[in-house]
Amino acid sequence: MTMIKPEVPSDPKAMIAEAERALADIAKIKAGIGTVIFGQESVIERTLVALLAGGHALLVGVPGLAKTKLVETLGTVLGLDDRRIQFTPDLMPSDILGSEVMEQDDNGKRYFRYVKGPIFAQLLMADEINRASPRTQSALLQAMQEYHVTIAGERHDLPQPFHVLATQNPLEQEGTYPLPEAQLDRFLMQIDILYPELEAERRVLIETTGTSDARAEKTIDAERLRDMQQLIRRMPVPEGVVDAILKLVRSARPGADNDIAKKFISWGPGPRASQALMLCARARALYDGRLAPSVDDVKALAEPVLQHRMALTFAARADGMNIRDVIGNLTKVAL
């Protein structure tokens, strides 16, 4: 089986040693998160995969499923400078990016000084992101893709690493604004948070209703996270995995040569989805202790990577189809 070569050639022994060290750190991270977040292993895995891959994630779930707590815990465990913005209908772009203020020196000369907003953080939590207007949501577009912002024609670089973890409530639609396609496409994954299992919910009851709450502790720092992200980008990818990614993503576009796309898909994922699948497959492989991704990684990540990058036709909705059904059927056909 041929392999897609990484950009920077690596000594196999050195890479194995790096991977073993990364695995030890990932185990510590999981243990640290587990002291505060009970159950939800799939959610934790996908969120960590998104961060290890260097991307952003959209957490979708009903209230009370510890979305906010998870993001706060990740900031602590990963040693990142984290900030939280509560998105509201009256939130303005300057409340996120910052703004210029006029000041006067001792000689009476006036000048503008840029006061940075909360976006200048390594981990930004956009809480209930769909409650802000499209104008305010668009303040994140440049930052999430280019990792800098432009204020009054001046470029201001964001801290590295920079990640946005946004939360969204799927139930309450009044007073909310759907995220535009350009905004959704910048999220590496959409992670759906479901109700916890019985034993996990039992532990929540016991652990969180006493006189003290468990607190997470720092396990790594931002520089170590950056090293792990670079390791993932150097991991080799089998050519069969690359072909599987291309086949799946291209099969999910209107006009693709399959009955599912022709009948049920209104618009589909672009090349950014292929990039996301490639990075996430590598990150998931490392998370599981493997040095190269497999087609099974692509299958496991198809739903969280593709579901927010697609829309169904009226015929699909009339037939009672949902996006997960379509992705599941496409995965079976394509892979």
Image (tube, helix red, strand yellow):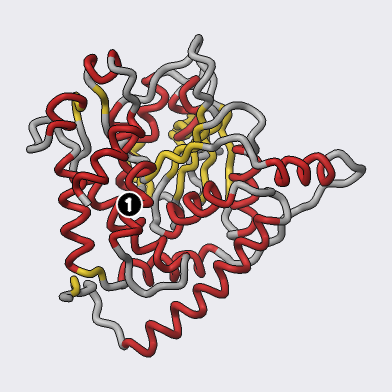
Q: Quadrant of the N terminus?
A: bottom left
On screen, residue 64 versus residue 145, left or right, reads right
Q: Residue at x 33, y 18 (%)?
A: 320
Q: Position of residue 197 (x, y in %)?
A: 65, 42
Q: Is residue 225 visible?
A: yes
Q: Residue at x 79, y 51 (%)?
A: 214
In this rendered view, identify the residue nearer to me: 90 or 310. Answer: 310
Number of marks in the rendered image? 1
Q: Position of residue 96 (x, y in %)?
A: 48, 32
Q: Residue at x 26, y 26 (%)?
A: 311
> At label 1, which amino acid type do we have?
Lys
Q: Position of residue 217 (x, y in %)?
A: 71, 60
Q: Residue at x 53, y 25 (%)?
A: 169
Above or below: residue 277 compared with residue 258: below
Secondary element type, mark 1 = helix
Above or below: residue 208 compared with residue 231: above
Above or below: residue 283 compared with residue 178: below
Q: Residue furthest top?
A: 174
Image quadrant of residue 198?
A: top right
The residue singled out by tag 1 in the image is: 299
Q: Is residue 152 visible?
A: no
Q: Residues within 10 Å of mark 1 (few under 14, many from 20)?
A: some
